[in-house]
Amino acid sequence: MPGILTVASKEFSDILKSRRFIILVTIFLLLTVAAQATLYMTFSSIGITLPRGFLGSAAYSLISIMSSFAPIIGLALGFDSISGEREKGTLKIVLAQPVYRDAFFNGKFLAAIFAVSLALFISSVINVAGAIFVLKITPTIEEVFRIIIFMLFSILFATTYYAIAAFLSVVCKRSSQSMILSIVLWALFTFVITIIAALIAFIMIPIRVPAGITITSGGGVVTITQVPNATGTLTFTPPEIQQYESEMMARVQIMTTISSVTPNYHFSRIAEYVLGVYAAGGVGAGTTASISLISSLVYALPNMLVLTIVTILFFIASYMIFTRQEIR
């Protein structure tokens, strides 16, 4: 244990002093401020009253920032965690000292968790403080607890990506290779799989809109309106409406099933349960806001378990490979 803490302390200090970490935190702090200001100006310019409570205006910004920032900070810290040390020759030197491989690897992982926690904490505090200053709204006790819990899950989300990047750093001989693979996986999880899921759902279940139906959307809600034809009579029957709705549900189910292979999907579900019920235009806005914090956590439990299990599996795989590798 003392060896792990020694390595973690040294690694944590190096991360905080690194130009990469400082640039990342600075960029995302600026994005946090810009996102909050943009949301406020959008509501003000179109004359919409801000949603109820502090999280009514701040939740959307928090979710958007963390969905983007957490994976990037995790990948940025993990892609060269082992391969970078190997390339610089410091790995062989360190392991020649009375430092065991497990202490070295666990110490680096622990330091990364501390660094990720610090970065996300700073980003969240700036976001919340900016919202309080600009919107003149003070969060309630429950909202404070929701924000804290959301921050913890954001740390878990970033740690999941760090574990994936660390695994690539262990199996790849060069940092450039692990960096490329990390970027590819990030793009795959963030964009590509979502697009593929939509295409597959469209091919498997092509939705046919019955004649005489007008479909409008707003605030995340789809409205189906019956429209009379030229003779003044309706040109569709209730079974057609039911068929359309069932096709939509089946299509959404296919997209959800495919997207569930990504960590991003599970984090978005957790965010919706913990904060999204308050967000303007968010899932469940105005209908599920009465859900208690305990109920939100119960609903999000499967998604929490998935992120936790994925993180543990990649950590174990990286650990086993690293402790058995030949260091040259």
Image: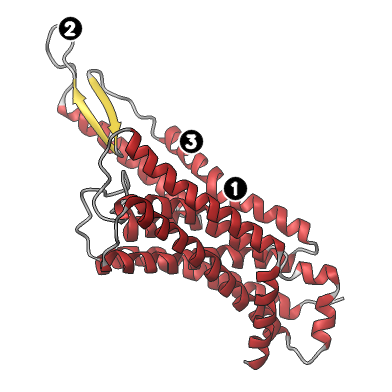
Q: Residue at x 38, y 58 (%)?
A: 271
The residues bearing labels 3 and 1 have C-alpha atoms spaced at a distance of: 17 Å
Q: Label 2, secondary structure: give it.
A: loop
Residue 326 visible in this rendered orientation of the protein: no
Q: Residue at x 28, y 28 (%)?
A: 216
- Horizontally, residue 79 falls left or right of residue 233, namely right
Quadrant of the snapshot with the N terminus: bottom right
The residues bearing labels 2 and 3 have C-alpha atoms spaced at a distance of: 35 Å
Vertical position of residue 99 compared to residue 18: above or below: below
Quadrant of the snapshot with the C terminus: bottom right
User: Which residue is disc 1 drawn over?
Assistant: 187
| Residue neighbourhood size for the residue with mark 2, other residues' Cα within 10 Å, grouped as few (<14), some (14–19), many (≥20) | few
- Which residue is farthest top? 231
User: Which residue is disc 2 drawn over?
Assistant: 230
- Horizontally, residue 63 falls left or right of residue 51, namely right
Question: Could you tell which of marks 3 and 1 lies nearer the N-terminus?
Answer: 1
Q: Quadrant of residue 254?
A: top left
Amino acid residing under circle 1: Ala
Residue 56 in the image: x percent, y percent?
29, 51
| Residue neighbourhood size for the residue with mark 3, other residues' Cα within 10 Å, grouped as few (<14), some (14–19), many (≥20) | some
User: Which residue is disc 3 drawn over?
Assistant: 199
Vertical position of residue 3 compared to residue 67: above or below: below
